[in-house]
Amino acid sequence: MIKKTRAKYRILIVDDQRDVRNVLSSSIETLGSDFGVLAVPSGEEAVLELSLQKFDLLVTDVRLPGISGLDVLRRVRSSQPDLKIILITGILDPVIRRNVADAGADAFFLKPVEPADFLDAIERCLGIVAEKMPPSNLLQPPPEEQASDEGVSERLTGLRQELEAFATVLLDERGRVVAQSGELPDQEAAAETLFQALMAGFSAGMKVSHYLGATRPDSLTYYGGTKYALFFAPVSNSHALLVVVNAVQIDEQISNTVQNVYTALYDLQNILERIGVSVRAEEPLPLGDEVELIDEEEEFEEDEEHAPILDAIFENVSVKGSQELDAFWDALADDSSSKSSAADVLTYEQALQLGLTPQDEKA
């Protein structure tokens, strides 16, 4: 439900992380009572809401469970050409930016979002500020951020080539691919099972580093297999590095591999830190299911449209039906009780058939 039903501007926020939705919603509310905000956690819910009511602005994360933010954009763009769209993402891959530009978004932000820039983009997209922001400024990050993002991809590629690895992958805290070099064997299955399992190790590694007083994540886990071997290391509070290598070759050069992975780990930390990602070894928050809590004191709005119909229905309800029903069950219970109490009693005819009656004396 839109928090301000009579708001002049209606904004839909889509992000699977509750804290992000809350931050964005709170930021927009500082603009005043003219702005109404609805926040949902998935692309499917966004498409549904967009089909049910009119919005002036859509703010969506690119990477979502189910359909992506780009998919939502494509689905609504043809039916609602006037809808303004702002995309937000933590993905660093330059290819994603090109996809965003081709999709026709009005603005694009990297996480973490600077509130002042975000609110400025909203006002410009909605025409509140007369001056239009140049498309290049909307869709392209600052030069230093672009160089840093390209540096992530280049560093992953360099590490893969150094180790002759199958793939090097940067994951976010939910096990989703942020950047990747090479191909993973059965990538779809890996995304559903392997990445999620590895993130349990990510949380444990961050907790241990925090307990030991490390200023940055400094752990490396090795998983050996028959065909593939994995190196896994936390990079920041929200990123982890995965390296997939040949299990047969690794035994001969494991020392060199560990050294190369650690070097890449430190390089990636420096790159992420330059674009504002925290790389301090802080204990991560649990990633359990998000539960929306309802304020018990919150007053629910009456459904004015259907209220007269419901009132008419309840006014015409008669108690006669319920009284007859009670009488039926009472009678049934009495009948059942009488049958039950006579269950061990035989009639004279039954006793006669069983030979249990006294024999008549012969004269």
Image: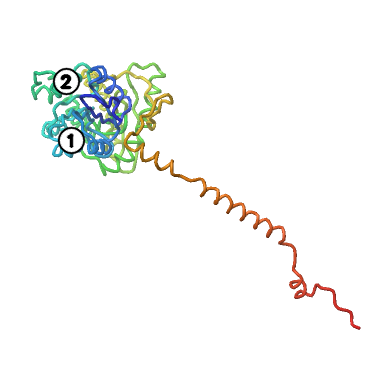
Question: Badge 1 local density, few (<14 within 10 Å), some, or many (20+)?
Answer: many
Whether residue 262 sits left or right of residue 349 in the image: it is: left
Residue 6's x, y, as percent?
A: 25, 25
**Residue at screen point 85% across, 77% down:** 359
Pointer 1: what residue? 73
Q: Earlier in the sequence, mark 2 or mark 1?
A: 1
241 w.r.t. 142: above or below: below
**Could you say which is closer to the camera, residue 272 or residue 31?**
31
Q: Specify whether residue 247 is in view.
A: no
**Could you say which is closer to the camera, residue 13 or residue 357?**
357
- Quarter of image, res 247: top left
Q: Specify whether residue 160 is in view.
A: yes
Residue 17's x, y, as percent?
A: 31, 29
**Could you say which is closer to the camera, residue 303 or residue 163?**
303
- Total tally of numbered discs in the picture: 2
Residue 262's x, y, as percent?
A: 28, 25
32 w.r.t. 98: above or below: above
Question: Badge 2 local density, few (<14 within 10 Å), some, or many (20+)?
Answer: some
**Residue at screen point 11% across, 31% down:** 101
> Under tag 1, what secondary structure?
helix
Question: In what quadrant of the picture does the N terminus appear?
Answer: top left
Pointer 2: what residue? 123
Question: In what quadrant of the picture does the C terminus appear?
Answer: bottom right
- Quarter of image, res 13: top left
Dot in front, 2 or 1: 2
Q: Amino acid at mark 2?
A: Glu
Residue found at the far right of this picture: 363
> Under tag 2, what secondary structure?
helix
**Residue at screen point 22% across, 21% down:** 34
